[in-house]
Amino acid sequence: MATVTIYSTPTCHFCHKAKELFKENNISFSDHNVFEDVAKRQEMVERSGQMGVPVIFIDDEMIIGFDEGRIRSLLNI
């Protein structure tokens, strides 16, 4: 099973869409709220070079934004 990590904020519509997709397909994921967690925000920026969310890692593959097709392809769903 893939390791899935999402960096998100509570008000991000596309973050919610990504997490719904994971839940609907029984995909376990780690969710880091970068609005509240400064250390995770810095980690996200260092890993991705991005300030916007969502930033999603599926194993070593990075997805910026909600690219449903790529997410489904990487997770085989």
Image (tube, grey):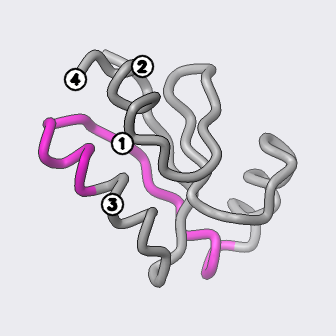
Q: Secondary structure at mark 1?
A: loop
* 8 with respect to 31 (left or right): right
Question: Which of pointers 1 and 3 lies earlier in the amino acid sequence?
Answer: 3
| Secondary element at tag 3 | helix
Q: Is residue 34 left or right of residue 77?
A: right
The quadrant in which residue 13 appears is bottom left
Q: Residue beneath label 4, please?
A: 77
Q: Which residues are magenta?
A: 20-37
Residue 17 position within the rendered picture, expressed as x and y whole percent measured from the top left: 33, 60
**CA separation, marks 3 and 2?**
17 Å
Q: Secondary structure at mark 2?
A: helix
Q: Can you identify the residue that label 2 sits on? A: 74
Using the numbered discs, state the Cα–Cα distance from disc 4 to disc 2 in whole angstroms.
8 Å
Q: Are marks 3 and 4 in contact (CB under 8 Å)?
A: no
Rendered-image quadrant of the N terminus: top left
**Sooner in the amino-acid sequence: mark 3 or mark 2:** 3
Q: Residue at x 79, y 41 (%)?
A: 47
- Left or right relative to 32: residue 22: left
